[in-house]
Amino acid sequence: VLIASACAAAGSAALALAPDAGLRDIGTSLFAAVVFSATGAYAVLPPVLGRVFVPAAIPAGVDPFAGIMRRLRHREAHPRLFAYFKMRTDPMFGELERMTGSPSVVIDIGTGFGIPAMWLAELFPNASVYGIEPDRRRALFADMMLAGRGSVATGAAPDLPVVPGKADTALMLDMIHHLDDGALRLTLERIRRKLVPGGRLVIRTTIPAGRRTFLRTVEEIRLKLSRARPVYREVGVLTALMKNSGFGNVSSVISGTGREEFWFTAEAGLP
């Protein structure tokens, strides 16, 4: 900007010194326009943008939806619209606090854009979330949106994010259908070792119903376009996998009404 404005000012100043009166008028007008524009760019725009982009001050736990939308207010349209409709239509967000309790240090496998991670950060001002996400662009976005309340790295299960010490909660939300039984078992075993004894594992996953639903049809089309091969499991199969990986007190409950998503919660046993 400095080089461009300096070159434009020099060129218009030279034109203002031309012997022809018409060219001098044009040069003078252009020089004045460049000076005004440069003054605005250097003296007016920075403080204005500083006030526009100041971090939003929203009391934690009051309205996580409003808090997240304030975090996203100057971001690109795709994640902002995705977050808006996801939070408005998915029963996950009305149920997440009940499933997690009051977490302090959270492992989030498959963070995506970080909407559930931000939801927990809004609800619990002292919580930190450490996530892992295979899509690099989404991982960078989620890491930026957490704003120091943890971190999100690029990677995929069975790898886990780097966490200082032990975690008390681990999330696997709408992602275990991307893992075969071997990868899921290894991920669960690694999570158990990373959780404090009694730490909570929270899984939400699709358990296909006998009838085909509209939401699953849309999801299957999306998975086919991405060439993914989902692995759906019955309640008993997933419960056995969790127990064999060292988790106890496994329970399951349906998410929302008329849907195919189920919540599974369990407690980590002794290593």
Image (cartoon, rainbow, N blue to C red):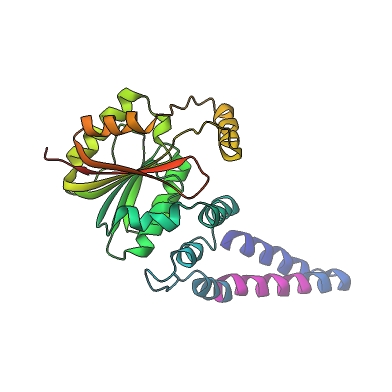
Query: Residue 185, relative to residue 26: is it above or below?
Result: above
Q: What quarter of the picture does the C terminus occupy?
A: top left
- Please state which of residues 232 and 30 is positioned toward the viewer in this rendering: 232
Residue 226 placement: quadrant: top right
Q: Residue at x 53, y 45 (%)?
A: 258
Q: Residue 37 in the image: state x and y as whole percent.
A: 66, 71
Residue shown at 67% from the left, 75% from the top:
36
Where on the picture, by quarter, is residue 193? top left
- The tally of labels here is 0
* Residue 242 inside the magenta-drawn segment: no
As for residue 34 lying within the magenta part, the answer is: yes
245 relative position to 262: left or right = left
Residue 202 lies, with reference to residue 134, above or below; the image says below
> Could you say which is closer to the camera, residue 166 or residue 144?
166
Q: Is residue 177 above or below residue 107?
A: above
Q: Position of residue 39 (x, y in %)?
A: 61, 74
Q: Quadrant of the N terminus?
A: bottom right
In the picture, measured across the screen, residue 227 lies left or right of residue 152, that is right
Q: Main secondary structure of the magenta part?
A: helix
* Closer to us: 172 or 40: 172
Q: Residue furthest left?
A: 270
Identified at 42% across, 30% down, the residue is: 178
Towards the viewer: 132 or 250:
250
Q: Provide residue 262's location: percent of width, then percent of height.
A: 41, 42
Q: Position of residue 181 (x, y in %)?
A: 33, 24
Specify whether 11 is left or right of 54.
right
- Magenta extent: 28-43
Residue 17 visible here: no
Can residue 213 be seen here? The reply is: yes
Question: Seen in the image, is 142 located left or right of residue 19?
Answer: left
